[in-house]
Amino acid sequence: MQDDTTARRVGFCPHCGNRSPQEVLCTQHFTTESWRHDGGKITPGEEFIGAHYVAVCRTCERILVYADFQIDVEHLSFEGAELLFPEPDELHHAVPEEIADIYEEASRIMVLAPNAYAVQIRRALEGVCEHRGALGGSLHDRLRQLATQGDIPPGLAEMTDALRIVGNIGAHYSRAKVTQPDASAIRDFFLAVVEYVYVGPNKVKEFRDRLEEIKRAPPPPAT
């Protein structure tokens, strides 16, 4: 097990957008167990040893929280832990990989380069249009096509058009600049698009599949 008093790593900090030294301030160990599907029933699985690490970014001095889970306490480490807070800016698995990759690349520059972030989100929007078959004309026309074919509601189409406009500002020389608050609004709008187009339908499908598993499960034995 890594010495908690000296645990350090270099990693990406979502607060300041830098790859920076991060140092553990305190560690809390705990035990938890996995869960598995067994003939339509959810039953306890293997027990894990876990650790929460409260760390500080030495560039911006803000707090980060990580977690690691292992079978053996000796294999716990801050180096291998996953970021819990701030919540990693990752898209749901239902979003096509090529769109998720563009978004992940954009998320790393949102704080440091809002103009470039806006351009990347515009690219991701183009990817959504292409994936959903809206292929003709400008991005404005393609977004309207998404609304016409029912992929997004009209109100959301207005939001995506705003993203297009801000993306244009970021891509061209202008006195206007995309600020960090603008970038946060762009992120919220884009996430609303992917929630409606990909995430919501996927969650409905997964829930229906789970209900079918429950229906097929054998009845409990008589007592």
Image: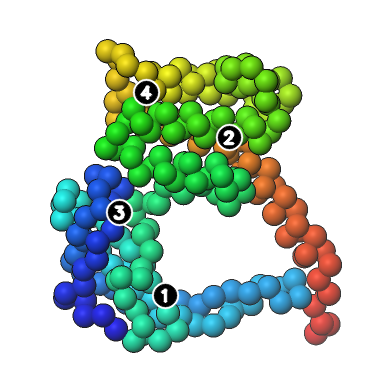
Q: Residue at x 61, y 22 (%)?
A: 143
Mark-to-mark CA distance, 2 and 1: 35 Å
Which part of the image, by quadrant, shows the C terminus? bottom right
User: Which circle, 3 or 2, is nearer the viewer?
Assistant: 2
Which circle's residue, 3 or 4, is located before the other in the chain?
A: 3
* Callout 2 amino acid: Gly
Q: Is residue 152 above or below residue 36?
A: above
* Callout 4 amino acid: Gly
Percent x, y for residue 71?
45, 84
Q: Residue at x 34, y 27 (%)?
A: 115
Which circle's residue, 2 or 1, is located before the other in the chain?
A: 1
Mark-to-mark CA distance, 3 and 2: 26 Å
Tags 3 and 1 touching, CB below 8 Å: no
Depth check: 211 or 89 in front?
89
- Locate residue 38 relative to residue 112 in the image: left or right: right
From the image, tell me which residue sits under label 1.
Answer: 69
From the image, tell me which residue sits under label 3.
Answer: 12
From the image, tell me which residue sits under label 4.
Answer: 170
From the image, tell me which residue sits under label 2.
Answer: 127
| SS of the residue under disc 3 | strand
* Callout 1 amino acid: Phe
Q: Is residue 154 above or below residue 213?
A: above
| SS of the residue under disc 1 | strand
